[in-house]
Image (cartoon, rainbow, N blue to C red):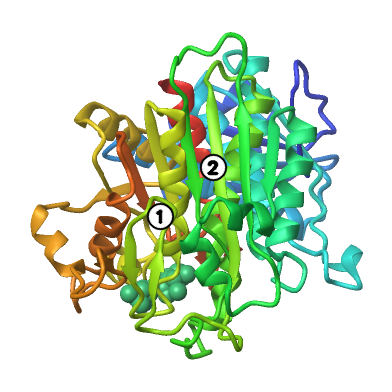
């Protein structure tokens, strides 16, 4: 993982990125006359935002901070700009780079460092010749008066946690089955110091978690139900905040089988909600945030094995309700329902679930943001949206009107697991709502969880979406 440190001094043989506005006075910074001429030319005539100067004993990149129409756009512009410079850094085979905060702009500097570190993520576990493909960059220094040691330590934690979450998503199911996912949470708990309890299939059966068990019927691998808990002595909340993550380690669609191209072939990502919950638990525990948080992950693969549940089956859920299962590919809501009902026992202040739940969410807003809905109060919703802008894991709230409840009515059971042809992400949310009795937000991350092409610092494959968002939210509330 990329090391991020605070640096009091930078020697003149160390590579730097000078972060400044276009009005910066380049005269007093050891640049030669011809270099200053070059810089001015690039800025005025060519309107450049990145300038590269190859000095005798070091590389100097100049990154211009541009004011966009809103602060969060300026900040994300810098994360994205860092990705462009990252390409130059690794092409030049540099092993370290130092960001010089020339005009005391600490949030811009941290955002740039964040974009650079997130761009440096790679998943090379299964490559024979790792060394050949590995990026050269190993260390990022931050030279800044206003960035505190604490902020830099926190940035390191957030980047590490996002990388952990990305890797969990990128791992294929032939390594990361439900049992392995639970083991990964146990490892994270040991490393960051939070508690992890894992229910095995026998315990899940004893608890009568019919939603999770029914999805698991077509699989050769047992399900797991993981409960993570971080409870510091100085927690500010009396009732816990509960995070629930969809842990479908692979979604074939079950008997309602998915087609392969651009559909089933990506479905190792169907535990991205679980990965976000694990990554967030890791980050808040490492950073020792004063907040009591519980993370719950129901996990299984969804397969069309011999014994698989069939459309038309009626399932007895954990909370005693019945579901007429009419599409085996709407499995996420089946397992989440049990987890959300289980969460009631904690009398939570707030529950947030994260799930790659519906193709309809992708159809609605693409990969740019998170589709959200829920019953939390306006203040909580606004805080969550604010964190969405802070981290650029933006949130689009859907209507959650009673009308949609009609669409999941069943003739023979308490509800069915599909709605009509429209508003698919909302009817999925409406299904989940039947299992809660507390303030709740549902985040459908089907769009941004997994990218088929990189988008600047959001690398191809798992993005780790949710970790930065929830960390920011839990820290500021
Ligand atoms: N895991 C999928 C949703 C998904 C789609 C995630 C694209 C990531 C990218 C989910 O289990 C699913 O298959 N949902 C169905 C529900 C439908 C059958 C009611 C869908 O959205 O098509
Ligand atoms: Zn599905
Ligand atoms: Zn799914």
What number is the disc on residue 337?
A: 1
Please state the horizontal and vertical placement of residue 310, each as a whole percent of the image: 44, 84
Mark 2 is surrounded, within 10 Å at the Cα level, by few (under 14), some (14 to 19) or many (20 or more) other residues, namely many
Q: In screen coordinates, is 250 left or right of 423?
A: right
Residue in the picture at 85% in, 72% down = 127
Determine whether 4 is above or below 401 in the image. above
Residue in the picture at 39% in, 50% down = 319
Pick whichever of labels 1 and 2 is earlier in the sequence: 1
Of the four image quadrants, the one with ligand 1 is bottom left
Depth check: 225 or 383 in front? 225
Q: Is mark 2 on a helix, strand or loop?
A: helix
Q: Is mark 1 on a helix, strand or loop?
A: helix
- Residue 283 lies in what quarter of the image? top right
Q: Mark 2 points at which residue?
A: 467
Please state the horizontal and vertical placement of residue 154, each as a whole percent of the image: 63, 26
Residue 29 visible from this viewpoint: no
Q: In screen coordinates, is 342 left or right of 96?
A: left
Depth check: 29 or 36 in front? 29
In the picture, the quarter occupied by the N terminus is: top right
């Amino acid at each position: 993982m990329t090391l991020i440190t605070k640096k009091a001094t930078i020697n003149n043989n160390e590579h730097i990125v000078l972060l400044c506005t276009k009005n910066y006075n380049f005269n007093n910074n050891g640049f030669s006359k011809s270099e200053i001429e070059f810089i001015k030319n690039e800025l005025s005539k060519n309107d450049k935002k990145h300038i590269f100067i190859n000095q005798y004993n070091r590389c100097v990149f100049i990154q211009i901070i541009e004011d966009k129409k809103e602060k969060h756009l300026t900040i994300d512009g810098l994360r994205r700009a860092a990705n462009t410079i990252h390409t130059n850094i690794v092409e030049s085979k540099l092993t370290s780079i130092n960001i010089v905060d020339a005009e005391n702009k600490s949030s811009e500097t941290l955002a740039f460092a964040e974009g650079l570190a997130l761009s440096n993520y790679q998943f090379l576990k299964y490559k024979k010749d790792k060394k050949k493909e590995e990026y050269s960059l190993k260390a990022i220094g931050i030279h800044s008066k206003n960035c505190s040691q604490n902020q830099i330590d926190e940035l390191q934690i957030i980047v590490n946690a996002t990388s952990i979450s990305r890797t969990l998503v990128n791992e294929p199911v032939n390594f990361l089955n439900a049992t392995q996912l639970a083991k990964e949470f146990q490892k994270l708990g040991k490393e960051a110091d939070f508690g992890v309890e894992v229910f095995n299939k026998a315990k899940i059966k004893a608890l009568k978690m019919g939603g999770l068990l029914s999805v698991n019927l077509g699989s050769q691998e047992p399900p797991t139900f993981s409960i993570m808990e971080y409870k510091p002595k100085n927690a500010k909340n009396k009732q816990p905040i509960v995070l629930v993550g969809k842990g479908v380690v692979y979604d074939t669609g079950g008997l309602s089988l998915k087609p392969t191209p651009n559909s089933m072939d990506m479905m190792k990502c169907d535990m991205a909600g679980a990965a976000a919950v694990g990554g967030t638990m890791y980050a808040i525990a490492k950073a020792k945030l004063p907040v009591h948080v519980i993370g719950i992950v129901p996990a299984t693969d969804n397969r069309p094995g011999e014994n698989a549940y069939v459309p038309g089956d009626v399932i007895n859920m954990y909370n005693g309700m019945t579901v007429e299962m009419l599409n085996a590919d709407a499995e996420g809501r089946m397992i989440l329902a049990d987890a959300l009902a289980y969460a009631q026992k904690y009398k939570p202040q707030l529950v947030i679930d994260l799930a790659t739940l519906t193709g309809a969410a992708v159809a609605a807003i693409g990969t740019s943001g998170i589709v959200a809905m829920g019953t939390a109060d306006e203040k909580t919703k606004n805080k969550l949206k604010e964190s969405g802008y802070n981290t650029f894991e933006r949130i689009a709230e859907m209507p959650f009107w009673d009308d949609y409840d009609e669409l999941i009515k069943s003739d023979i059971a308490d509800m069915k697991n599909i709605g009509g042809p429209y508003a698919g992400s909302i009817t999925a949310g409406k299904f989940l709502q039947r299992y809660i009795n507390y303030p709740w937000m549902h985040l459908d991350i089907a769009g941004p969880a997994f990218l088929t092409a990189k988008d600047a610092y959001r690398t191809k494959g798992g993005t780790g979406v949710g970790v930065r968002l929830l960390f920011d939210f839990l820290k500021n509330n």
